[in-house]
Structures are given as C-alpha cells and as structure tokens.
Image: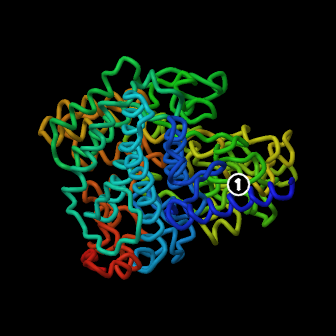
Amino acid sequence: MTIHMKTTYRYWIILVALVVLSTACNEDEFLKEEPLDFFSPSNAFVSFENFESSVFDLYAQLRNYRFNTPDQARAYLYGTDIMFDARESAANNRFGDYAITLNPTSNMPEWHWDRLYKIVASANTILDRLAQNSVLTEEEQQLIEAEARFFRGWAYRYLVHLYGGVPILLEEVTSPQTDFTRASREEVLAQIVADATFAADNLPGIADVAADGRVSNLVAQQLLAETYLAQQNWDAAISAATVVIDDPNTALMTERFGSRASEPGDVYYDLFRQGNQNRAGSNSEAIWVAQMEADVPGGYLTSTNQAGNTLERNHVPASWTLQDPDGNPAVLGWRSDLNTGGRGVSFMRPTSFFENTLWETDFDNDLRNSPINYIRDFRYDDPTSAWFDSSAVEYPGPNLMAQSWRWYPWLSKVTTPGRHPDALFADRDLGLLTAAGGSTYADQYYMRLAETYLLRAEAYLGRGDQTSAAADINVVRNRVNATPVSPGEVTIDYILDERARELSIEEDRRITLQRLGKLVERVRLYNPHNGDEIQDFHQVWPIPASEIEANINAILEQNEGY
C-alpha cells in the first residue's frame, strides 16, 4: 500500500512536469538569471544608496584622472608657458617633444580620451537608470541628476578644449557603436551650459552639501562662468561668477588660519597646508576640493607608499642628489622640509618666465613669491660637509653645474613639510623620509574663490570694462600685498600672468590656454624647451587614431595637421 501510494505520487509529479515543460515553458524566462547576492544592471540601481554610490564613483574617476600617478595626469602643466620637462628629454608623457606626445597613435591623446568618455558614459548610465526608477523621491532624483549632469558637463569641458568638437553622448551605450560623428565646438559648449545650468538649479548650496568635496550650486555656477567665457557671452559669465562671489558663505582668506597658523608663514602658505583646504578647516575660499585621505577605502592615498597625487615627486627637485663644491654628498637624504622638499625627482620645472619675469614688479612684496611659498635657495644640510648651511645657489657643486635639472626654484604648495605619515619617515627626528615618499598629503583644490574673481575680470575685459576687471584682479592682488594693477594695464595676457601667479599647479593651465586660443603663442614666447617645436595645429589635440579606425560606419574626422 505504501509502495503503491509513492509510485502514484511520483507518476503525477512526472506528468505535471511534462505538461508544464511542453505547454507552459517560456524559455527566455526560464533561463533568465535573477541576481540576488551580486550587483548587475538589473539590481544596481534600486535605491537612493545605489544611485549615490554610482555618483561617488564619478568623484573617484575624476580625482583619479586629475591626480593619477602617471605623467599623463600632469599634461595640464607640462609643455605650457609655466612648466616643462626638467630633464629636457623627448619623454612622451612629459611633453618632451610635441610631435611625439601629440601623435594620433601616441599614448597621451588616447589616455585622456578614454578616461573622459568613461566619466561621460558613467554619468549617462546613472541618468538613464534614474529615468526608469520608481523608488526615489523627487528631491533625491533631482540631486542625483544634478550631480551626474555636472560631471558629464565637466568631462565635456576637458574634451572640448583639448580636442575641439567631439561626439556628444547623452544616453547609455549598451552595445558596440561604430558610427560616431563629431559635434561642433559650439554644440559641445552649449551642452556643457545645459548640464551646468540644471546642476546649478538643483544642487544644494555650498553650506548645505552633505560633506566636504561634494559639488554645490556654486561649483556649477563657476563651470557656467568659464563656459560662457568660451562662448564670449560676457554678461552671462559676469552673472554666474557674481553668484559665487556674492554668496554669503564665500570670502577670500585674508588672515593666518588653520593647522600651521602659529608657525612662520603667511595666509597664502596656509591655503595649502594639510587640513586647511576645506570649509571644515574654516576655509571660506574653497569652492570645490578633491579629498585625499590616507589609508581610508577610496581615499586615494596610503601612508606606506606613493599612491596617487605625486605632485611632490614630480615638481620638487632632486636635492638629495646634489654634491657640495668639494664633490661630497650635499644632504643627509630625502628630508620632509622646505629645504629639500621630500622625495622629489626633478621632472616638472618652472620656465624662466615663471621663475623670474612674472615677479619682476613685486619680487620682494608679493606673498606668493615669499621664501616660504617659492623656494629659491637650497642650503647644504649635511653637518659633516665643509659647506654646511651654505647656499647651493651661491656655491653650486659640480653635478649641479653640469646638470641644472638637479635643482631649480619650486613651489611649496605641492608638499607637506613635516607632515608626511609616520610610516614614511626613516628618521622622524631628522625629518628623513623613506624611498616610498613622493605623494602630497593634502587635499587639492579644483576651484577656489581667487579664480572666480579672475574669471569675472576676464568677462569684464571682454565687455570692454577694464575698470571693473582691474578691481577684481586687485581683490586677489591686495590679499598678497602685490601692487594694484591699473585699468589701462589689464589685458588678457595680464590676466593669464595673474592666473599663473595665483593658481600655479592648481589650475588646468593647458585648458585655460587652449580655451583662450593662447597655448601656441605663449609656449613660443615663454617655454624655451618646447617653443621651437610647437606647431599651430597643436592648439588642439589629435583624435586618437584607434577611435577613428574603430568607427567604421561613419567618419570621425581628424583635426587639421594630424
């Protein structure tokens, strides 16, 4: 009886299964994978936290792009009017030679193109999935859209000034596409304005952002001001910059402040000391700051090795390689101070224009050129040397005379003297670092208010109002005790000079010069290493050859000259 019942039960199970399989099976549904314990396109955007995590990835992508360890990330400084390859080599990624660096098949154009379009693609994925969601509140949806659109506009800012007109992608690309065409420069600028306007209207105020480093409505307004300048829409640029300047939560820092205020220095020096870049550090001048936290997941820095943001390594000269005039070692080693500067390797050297010409009017009184901000001398620091505490500039050793790249004046804003992590000190009492040094352990500015004044000055000049332009420039110059500029002295080149003095290394110098069509002219005038090789067509970069070759179903036109 029991056996019969079991047999009958099995029979009915088999029969029902056969019926279901033969009459009711939808093969697509049957084979459809439902991910329950890992992220996939179907479940990665189902909550506000999911969307916010994807937005955080945009922040990380941009920070990695701008402060990456490879030399490509320093492209905005190398080969410009203010910086060049100190080794004067033909190094591809340090703009040792424009023809080599900006070849359509070289690494540089492709490296930037790929990373910028990755930001665009990531933003588009967020925006497309946002349109499909039914979970977020209207306020949450607007915030996510505003941040994603800001980053898309910011990526196109780089793309349009580097390459000119480029393909505009506004939707997620979910399958291979080989029919891209270039939009015009004007169309790309208009798209940046559209994205930045939405962001400005929907991002929180600078005092209301969730955390330091998050973009606010003022960040979007500054992007608008710069883009309006590229469109020569002077009045709109003035209005956007004025929103930032007149916000009650922003003001230039004019008094000593922050973590090193009790030590020798000045207010300009304080702007770049560890812990001073954010509003949490009482900095009302900061508009947008890249967060650099050591040993924090996603923080970008580690306390035991070089890991991104290697401005110290790139710009600080290799003082530790110097000899004293007797040919003996000049220093004890890699010292974390304002004499040696840390673990520098002498890659990114200021041009003589930036070293000398820019400061002629106010060499002794402009704080930005003070001995603590622009290090112009080096003292032998090995107590066993007969030349101990003597000036290496006045008494150079034989290898410095033979190879000038070993030491040059450098900017202290790229390093954190005495504040490297403990694990990087071989001898903390002497301030000696290990060979793993080289990163800059401080947050980095994307935007600060001094630049906003200079952007508005540029707009006033474009409108023909030199008096108002001079007034804005002098707000910046007065803070550092520089001689005020008169209205008749204000030209676009004067503004570029002032940007170099105030924003050196911080600003995307190449982007500024390309936006204004001044790159080739000023490199020829002020960069002796690159001035005789740069060609007119280097005003914009080539479209990567790999992109043109892969685009088989449409013509992706190459820029003239390449």
Q: How is the image coloured?
A: rainbow
Q: Nearer the viewer, residue 490 or 69?
A: 69
Quadrant (top left/top right/bottom left/bottom right) for the C terminus: bottom left
Q: Residue furthest left?
A: 464
Describe residue 431's horizontal placement relative to residue 556 as left or right: right
**Which residue sits at x=66%, y=65%?**
400
Question: Residue 377 at what x, y percent from top left?
Answer: 62, 49
> Is 209 on the left or on the right of 86, as rendered?
left
SS class, disc 1: loop
Whether residue 265 is visible to the viewer of this picture, yes or no, is yes
Name, please, the residue furthest toward the front: 1
**Quick one: 419 or 223, which is closer to the camera?**
223
Location of residue 447 with respect to 376 vertically, above or below: above
| Amino acid at pointer 1 | Gln
Q: Residue at x 31, y 33 (%)?
A: 200
Quarter of the image with the N terminus in it: bottom right
Residue where numbered disc 1 is placed: 306
Quadrant in which residue 203 is drawn: top left
Residue located farthest toward the top when viewing the structure as drawn: 248
Mark 1, other Cα within 10 Å: few <14 / some 14–19 / many ≥20: some
Image position of 248 with respect to 468: above or below: above
Residue 358, x across and y down, in percent: 39, 48
Q: Nearer the viewer, residue 301 or 525?
A: 301
**Residue 394 visible in the displayed image:** no
Q: In the shown orientation, is residue 313 left or right of residue 63?
A: right
Number of callouts? 1
Q: Nearer the viewer, residue 60 or 407?
A: 60
As displayed, is residue 54 above or below residue 205? below
Q: Position of residue 98 (x, y in %)?
A: 41, 74
Q: Residue at x 36, y 33 (%)?
A: 142
Q: Residue, x 53% and y 30% (percent of image)?
A: 212
